[in-house]
Amino acid sequence: MLMLSLIRALAVLIAWLVPWLVHLVTWLVARSLNMPQPIVYATSMFVFAQVYAVEMRVGRGLQRQLQSLMR
């Protein structure tokens, strides 16, 4: 019972902390680049999506190569 309450408390803390940290980092980067915060946030989401897509393509290619080597 105590473990469950500790896990819930940790989950609540993380759920509150992560968005706050994202906001803080976005604000700091926007301030250092002298740009509006929404532009920095949108650009970071675009870059994240592009990097994720490239990593997935590379991962699938490596997976195919490993499968062909194992045959």
Image (cartoon, helix red, strand yellow):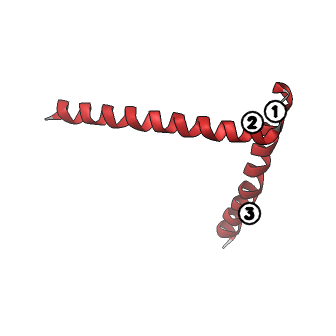
Label 1 neighbour load within 10 Å: few <14, some 14-19, many 20+: some
Amino acid identity at mark 3? Ala
- Secondary element type, mark 3: helix
Question: Which numbered circle lies on residue 9?
Answer: 3
Q: Circles 2 and 1: CB distance less than 8 Å?
A: yes
- Secondary element type, mark 1: helix
Q: Is residue 71 left or right of residue 4?
A: left
Amino acid identity at mark 1? Ala
Label 3 neighbour load within 10 Å: few <14, some 14-19, many 20+: few
Does residue 33 sit above or below 17 in this rendering? Answer: above
Q: Earlier in the sequence, mark 3 or mark 2?
A: 3
Q: Is residue 16 left or right of residue 56?
A: right
Amino acid identity at mark 2? Val
- Secondary element type, mark 2: helix
Mark 3 vs mark 1: in front: 1
Q: CA distance from mark 3 to mark 1?
A: 32 Å
Mark 3 vs mark 2: in front: 2
Question: Which numbered circle lies on residue 40?
Answer: 2
Q: Earlier in the sequence, mark 3 or mark 1?
A: 3
Q: Which residue is mark 1?
A: 30
